[in-house]
Amino acid sequence: MEWALTFAAFVIGSVFGYVGHSVLSRNSKDKSQNKQLEQTQLELSQYKQEVSDHCDDHDKQLAELTNLITKVNQKWSTSASVLTATPPSTVASEAEAIDNHSASIDSAHPRST
């Protein structure tokens, strides 16, 4: 009977030990999972901030590029208007210069027919 009480105490102790171990391991698992969750949330918020900063920088660069392209287009437009709009006196003097140059070439070389 002494063996029976010892065996019963061993079984009851084993059951209590298993239950206690299960409860404690769940608590430690929950704690480690909570720590992992907090760490992951922190990493995610840092990544979101990095992406947001990158997008802000990209937007600034795009705005600068747009501004530069606008300036280039304005300069091209100004240059084109200056080059295409010649004063009438300049056009007449250029035509005379071409005619005088042609006449001097014609008089210098006799025509062979």
Image (cartoon, grey):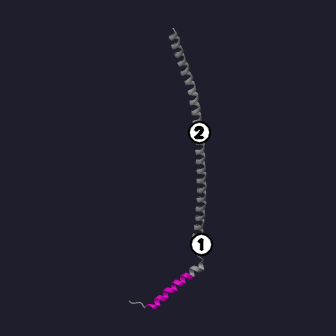
Up-down relation of residue 67 to residue 95 (above or below): above
Judged by depth in the image, the label closer to the viewer, 2 or 1, is: 2
Numbered tag placed on residue 82 in the rendering: 1
Mark closer to the chain start, 2 or 1:
2
- Which residue reaches farthest left? 113
Q: Label 2 vs label 1: CA separation? A: 64 Å
Tell me where the magenta segment starts and ends, as one range. 93-109
Of 25 and 61, nearer the camera is 25
At x 60%, y 69%, the residue is 78
- Which residue reaches farthest top? 1
Q: Quadrant of the C terminus?
A: bottom left
Identify the element where label 2 is drawn: helix
Q: Percent x, y for residue 54? A: 58, 51
Numbered tag placed on residue 39 in the rendering: 2
Q: Percent x, y for residue 70? A: 60, 62
Up-down relation of residue 75 to residue 54 (above or below): below
Figure quadrant of residue 23: top right
Of 2 and 80, nearer the camera is 2
At x 60%, y 53%, the residue is 57
Q: Percent x, y for residue 21? A: 55, 24
Q: Amino acid at mark 2?
A: Gln
- Which residue reaches farthest front? 2
- Residue 45 counted in the magenta span: no
At x 54%, y 84%, the residue is 97
> Magenta stretch mostly in which secondary structure?
helix
Q: Percent x, y for residue 99? A: 51, 85
Figure quadrant of residue 30: top right
Numbered tag placed on residue 17 in the rendering: none
Identify the element where label 1 is drawn: helix
